[in-house]
Image: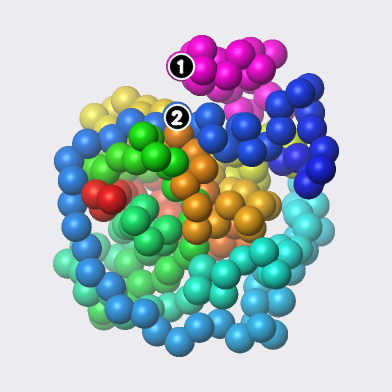
Amino acid sequence: MIAEGKQAVGLNRRSFLVGLAAVGALGLAGCATTGGGMSDADAARIYGPLPNERFPIPAVNLSKLDPKYRRQRVRYDSKEAVGTIIVDPRNYYVYRIEGDGYATRYGANVGRAGFLWSGEAYIGRKAEWPIWTPPKEMIARQPEAAPYANGMAPGLNNPLGARTLYLYQDGVYTLFTIYSTIMPETIGRGVTSGCVGLLTQDMLDLYDKTPVNTKVIVIKA
């Protein structure tokens, strides 16, 4: 990922974010009620630095994150199995079903206007510090991504970040991911071409709890 105010080969991190591609189908709906918010002290602890990662992760600048997007346990009425991931792009949330009428809720960024989608998929594979390869459709829209046609090495500049969950339908990779970001200013916004981003600290929490073949539902926005 690219630190604020810096660029890599003329292509900054925001350009990467708005260029990530995704596909989807089958509109679905959900219902949730919120619980209590996270305290500032807890937020400072949960969103603190991660120095032991392969590429050390900085603390989240909480002044750039609306408190409503902090991770929390909430009431969520769902018949889906424990572990199911539900994406609510209209409200910029990702839920992990915990059972007994509860879910863990994470703030997210989602697809910008014209790139919103809805549907059902599953986690086909997972990756830590993945290589990022821009789809040919993105390169056509953003030629500055062409230098990475054969892949961008892992690291803080890589737009997929520290962890990525890849979504599949019928055995085929959809080009859609749930990825990690160190840019809190993107949470609660539509900035991508359909992919969903969580703060790295939240993504590590979700990633560790999510096995391959986990069901994912994206609610129609």
Quarter holding the N terminus is top right
Q: What residue do we see at 38% from left, 35% from top?
A: 115
- 84 shown above or below 66: above
Does residue 84 show up magenta in the picture? no
**Residue numbers of the magenta segment:** 125-153
Q: Nearer the viewer, residue 137 or 122?
A: 137
- 60 shown above or below 119: below
Q: Which residue is mark 2?
A: 21
Q: What residue do we see at 50% from left, 74% from top?
A: 68
Nearer-N-terminus badge (1/2): 2
Q: Tags 1 and 2 in contact by the CB under 8 Å rule?
A: yes
Quadrant housing residue 92 = bottom left
Quadrant housing residue 65 = bottom right
Q: Is residue 105 left or right of residue 49?
A: left
* Mark 1–mark 2 distance (CA, rounded to whole Å): 8 Å
Q: Position of residue 52 (x, y in %)?
A: 79, 57
Quadrant housing residue 155 = top right
- 60 shown above or below 111: below
Mark 2: few/some/many CA within 10 Å (<14, 14-19, 20+):
many
Q: Which residue is mark 1?
A: 137
Amino acid on which disc 1 is placed: Glu
Q: Position of residue 97 (x, y in %)?
A: 32, 67
Q: Is residue 112 left or right of residue 216?
A: right
